[in-house]
Image (cartoon, grey):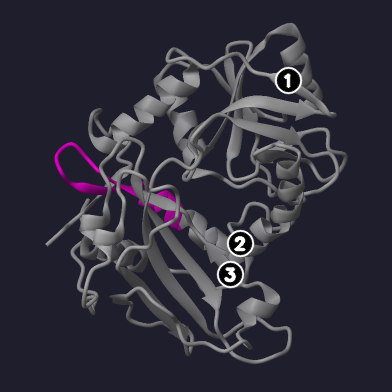
Amino acid sequence: MTVATEIPVQRIAKSKIDTVDFNNLGFGNYISDHMLVADFKNGKWHQPKIMPFGELAMTPAILALHYGQSIFEGMKAFKNKAGEIVIFRIQRHHQRLNRSLERMCMPSISEEMFTESLSSLIATDAAWVPTSEGSALYIRPVVFATESRLGVKISDEYKFVVLTSPVGPYFAKPVRVKVEEHFVRAAEGGTGFAKCAGNYGGAFYPTQLAKQEGFDQVLWTDAHDHQYIDESGAMNVMFVLNGKLVTPKLTSAILDGVTRNSILTLADDMGMPKEERKVSVAEIKAGFENGTLTEAFGVGTAAVVSTIAIINIGGKDYHLPADSASSFQQRVKKKLHDLRTGAEPDTHQWNFRVRVK
C-alpha cells in the first residue's frame, strides 16, 4: 500500500549529506536533513510539519523532564532491488507506539497520521537511505510531554517528533553478555512492555558495570528471584535448544519486539520448531554443559540478529559454538534481509512503499 502525503515541508537551505561517510556509518552518528514535528494542544493533534533538523524551543519546566512522560519507537527503512524505499512493519510499530502511549497516559496517534508523517519525512530525505550491505535508514519517532509547569500531573500538551539516521550494523561482532543477578530492568505490572525512556535510563547503570567487566550487554532476569530470563539489554533474546527455537514468553515486563515477532513468523515458514515459554537460567547453564544449547542471539530493530558468543552465569563464562552460515540465526537473518530488500517475495505484506515525488 502507498499513502499520498500533503504535509507542509520547509526545506533545508543546504543539505548536510556531503558530510556523511556512507562507507563508515556506525549507528546514530548522522541525523538526516529534516525532522517532522506535530503538537498536541487543546485535546487534539495539530497538523504535522516537516522542517530542517534543529533545536526545539522549550523550557526546563516541561513535564517530560520531571515526571518521565516520554516514549519512542525504533524502525527502519530500506531501498529494495527495484529502487523503491520501503518501511518495515509500519503497522506493528504503530500499534506498539500506541500501547506505550496508553501506558504512559499520553494521547494516541492515528494510523493515518503516523503513516503519512513517516512516509512524507522519508520521501523528503530519500537521498539519505543507504544501500550498502547491513545498512538502513533508522527512524526514530518520539513523543514527550511539553506542558510547562511544576506539579505531578498528566501533561495536557505533547510533541510528536520524527528523526531519521542512516546507520550501519549496531553490533559489529558477536557479543558477550552477563546474566544479571541483582539489578532489575522491569517487573510484572510495570512499564517493561512499553518503549518508554525511563526503562532505558534505568538500565544504564547495571549495563555500565557489566561493560567494566568486559561484557557488551546484560541478560535481564525476572524481578522476583532472578531465575528466569526476560530479555537482553537492547534486544529480545532467542536460543536454539535441542534443535528448537526457544524464546522467553512475553509478559508485561518484556518488550514485544517487532523483530522478535518477525523471526517467530519466519521460523514457521522455515519449518523450525519453536517454543515461547519461561526460560530458566538453570536450563541455559545445563544446555551449555550437555551440549543441547547450540545458538544464542539477540534480535531487535537496531541489532537485527546479533550473535551471542559468551554468556556469563554466576561469574563463569560459557562459550557458544562458533557461528556458521548454516546456523538458524544466519539463515533467518538472510531471509529477513531478502524480504526487506525484495530479493524474496513479501508474502506477509510487511513492507510499506514510500512514494517519492
Left or right relative to 348: residue 61: right
For label 3, the residue is 70
Q: How many marks?
A: 3
Q: For numbered disc 2, what is the local secondary structure?
A: loop
Amino acid bearing label 3 = Ser
**Residue positioned 43% across, 40% down in the render:** 169
Q: Which mark is residue 318?
A: 1
Amino acid bearing label 1 = Tyr
Question: How far, Cα to Cα, is label 1 from label 3?
Answer: 37 Å
User: Which badge, 2 or 3, is on the more N-terminal residue?
Assistant: 3
Query: Where 151 sits versus 298, above or below?
Result: below
Few, some or many residues within 10 Å of mark 2 (<14, 14–19, 20+): many
Please name which of the two marks, 1 or 2, marks the residue nearer to the observer. 1
Please name which of the two marks, 1 or 3, marks the residue nearer to the observer. 1
- Tell me the magenta residue range: 77-94
Amino acid bearing label 2 = Cys
Residue 13 in the image: state x and y as whole percent.
21, 78
- In this view, the residue in front, 132 or 60, is 132
- In this view, the residue in front, 63 or 23, is 23
For label 2, the residue is 196
Q: Identify the image quadrant of residue 139.
A: bottom left
Left or right relative to 123: residue 226: right
Residue 39 in the image: state x and y as whole percent.
43, 82
Residue 209 in the image: state x and y as whole percent.
77, 47
Q: Are marks 2 and 3 in contact (CB under 8 Å)?
A: yes
- In this view, the residue in front, 234 or 283, is 234
Left or right relative to 120: residue 298: right
**Residue positioned 42% across, 51% down in the render:** 75
Question: How far, Cα to Cα, is label 1 from label 2?
Answer: 32 Å
Q: Which mark is residue 32?
A: none
